[in-house]
Image: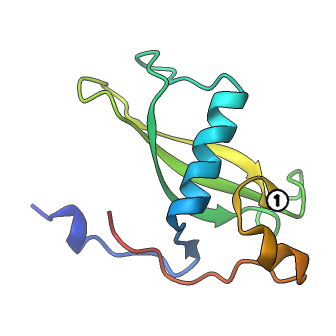
Amino acid sequence: MHDVDDAMVRPELIALDWTARERVREQIAAKGGYCECCGAREFDGGAALYLGFLFLDEDHDAYMVALTCRNRECAKPRTGIVLSEKDFLDGERLSRGENASPAPASPR
């Protein structure tokens, strides 16, 4: 059995810093997000995956942010939320016209 820290981290995932994770939590709260399995409203944010180049029906600045339900009793704790780049990534970086680079995500 593998430890979570031993799992292979995909190079296309973008690690989120504390500020970006807080912005994700704010977006979840603003949208009234909840876990479809247990109804909990608290999540831990994970890495982001850029969707714009993968799916033609997504906006060019769309990202899927991995979420894990904080309810330890939840039967299906893994989910995600699609957000626009401006909704959670560093505003200073965006104002300079820089996209998030797909740097490896650090394991949680």
Q: Which residue is mark 1?
A: 86
Viewport quadrant of the C terminus = bottom left
Residue in view at x 78 percent, y 79 percent: 93
Task: Give the x, y percent position of residue 90.
Answer: 72, 69
Drawn side of residue 16 relative to residue 68, left or right: right
Quadrant in the picture for residue 62: bottom right
The residue most toward the top is: 39
Q: For the residue marked with disc 1, what is the amino acid?
A: Lys
Q: How many marks?
A: 1
Drawn side of residue 56 relative to residue 85, left or right: right
Task: Give the x, y percent position of residue 97.
Answer: 90, 82
Specify few, some or many for label 1: CA neighbours under 10 Å numbering under 14, 14-19, or 20 or more. Answer: some
Task: Give the x, y percent position of residue 98.
Answer: 82, 83
Residue in view at x 39 percent, y 74 percent: 106
Residue in view at x 70 percent, y 56 percent: 88
Quadrant in the picture for residue 85: bottom right
